[in-house]
Image: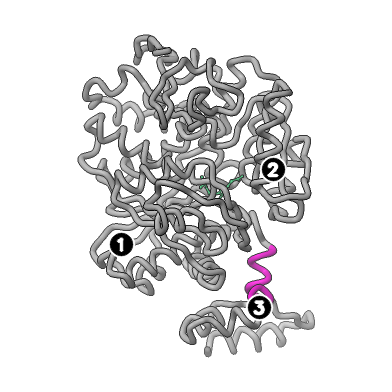
Amino acid sequence: MGAQPKKYSTEGAVDASHYLRCIGCASTLEGPEAAEDFRCRDCGSLLEVEYSDMLAGRRTEWPEVWKQRRASHLPLDRSGVWRFRELLPVLKDSQNAVTLEEGNTPLYPLPRCAESVGIDHLSAKHQGMNPTGSFKDTGMTVALSVAHERGFPWVACASTGNTSAAMAAYAARAGMGALVLIPEGKVAWGKLSQSLDYGAVTCQLKTDFDGCVAVLAQLVRRAPVYLLNSVNPYRLEGQKTPAAEMAEAMDWQVPDHILVPGGNLANSSALGKGFSELLALGLIDRLPRISVIQAAGANPLVTSLLQYGGKHLDPVQAETRATAIRIGNPASWQKAVKTLQRTGGWCEQVTEQEIALAKAEIGADGVGCEPASAVTLAGLKKLVRQGKIERREKVVLLLTGHTLKDPEYTIDFHRGGLLSREELAEMPPEERMQAGKLATSPIALDPSVEAVMRVLDAAVGS
Ligand code: F0G
């Protein structure tokens, strides 16, 4: 059933000119023909969005158009996703897009982290600076817009908290119903509060994320809800746009290396797709390495690569305080393996102690992030120690979530209650010392100037 993709147009509203291709058996189908669970009906693999004509020629005028849109006052142009709409013609009419002016996130230098890691150029692409505080907004604006345009009244997702926050917000903007399945007790408060505030029907299931996915996979076959997990290939189209933002911010050069947290393993491949398309368009002249970092307690990709060269994946029982990536059976692992292979990236795992220290170090650079994002800095340290990243390389950490998503984790760390005695004992002494130096507990004082002065004097003198 080969699709006959329509002609791509750069005029006016962007015409839907995409089709879907199975990453397993390469069969193609029209967008609306996809199964409810976005798996190939022939082989069960995931689908990918492809464009018929977009990559046919060099589109050298686009970067100027994209830059000019930033100065426009139209929401679609001000969105850091839709201003790149030539790269994602998935809607019949781009005016159907549901946007919160997502994207256009900052690329912050991390000078202190760079020094302590021992490299010259380190930045953070902070996807936590999106409207709902995570990178999910960039994908959600695209996939939810597709659902909206196709007339679905309800959307649904299983989530560790950020997808559900983003979906609930965009659904509310579009006046659509939102059904959220989350693992009970394993979602950070900031994220749960968002889902409630945006009015989603929020179900806490007595299982983990993987269990929520299993329930939802059956539900979408029985109820007319549109699935917005990252198996939905339109999510990845939005999540690829930070590639264009990074290239644009570096004058259409690319960093040498980008480190991405790995959970359900869609985001790494979205970025890889973004850079690959820019390369095919002639807008960049090489690919950055994209490496995936997992928490040691939720490391199925690390294990798959070690044991099976990435050809097979055994699910694991996931456990980590970085609840966003507490995932044992990642849906998009095959896409992530392809990205690692295509870009020459590595896959590493980092311990709970390494995540906690890295998060505090990113915080001390005035940037901050949620725990799952901090795996990137912890992974970078390992790759530098292994000699896989050299001092002169330009490295970018993809920070996926805002520090306010999980304030409990941060407060526990600073009050000294996050890591267990055993975990602290396992830390190398210099790392334990560094963590101790960074921990800053609140100081309870009498309401007197003298008391505060004493504290300030001690701080200035230290
Ligand atoms: N970082 C954060 C903050 C996340 O919320 C997630 C995933 C990831 C990294 C991993 O990205 O799954 O594409 O590999 N969160 C999902 C959710 C699973 O439901 O919010 P991935």
> Is label 3 within 8 A of ligand 1 (CB to nearest ligand atom)?
no
Q: Nearer the viewer, residue 370 or 150?
A: 150
> Where is residue 131 shown, x and y percent of the image?
58, 41
Q: Position of residue 419 (x, y in %)?
A: 63, 75
Q: Nearer the viewer, residue 6 or 302?
A: 302
Residue neighbourhood size for the residue with mark 2, other residues' Cα within 10 Å, grouped as few (<14), some (14–19), many (≥20): many
Q: In the rendered image, is residue 108 in sight?
A: no
Q: Which residue is mark 2?
A: 212
Identify the residue position indicated by label 1 in the image: 121
Marks 3 and 2 in Cβ contact (< 8 Å): no
User: Marks 1 and 2: which is nearer the front?
Assistant: 2
Q: Is residue 434 magenta?
A: no
Mark 3–mark 2 distance (CA, rounded to whole Å): 29 Å
Give the mark nearest the N terminus, 1 or 2: 1
Amino acid under disc 1: His
Disc 2 is placed on an element classified as helix
Where residue 406 appears, as percent x and y from the top left, is 65, 58
- What secondary structure is found at the residue carrying circle 1? strand
Secondary-structure class at tag 3: loop
- In the rendered view, tell whether residue 321 sits above or below residue 461: above
Point 49% across, 87% down: residue? 429
Quadrant of the rendered image containing residue 3 = top left
For label 3, count other residues whose C-alpha is less than 10 Å away and answer few (under 14), some (14-19) or many (20+): few
Residue at x 51% of width, y 33% of height: 235
Q: Is residue 131 above or below residue 396?
A: above
Kind of residue at disc 2: Cys
Determine the CA span between mark 3 and mark 1: 34 Å
The span shown in magenta is: 408-420
The residues tagged by marks 1 and 2 sit, at their Cα atoms, a distance apart of 40 Å
Q: Which residue is mark 3?
A: 420
| Residue type of the residue flagged with mark 3 | Ser
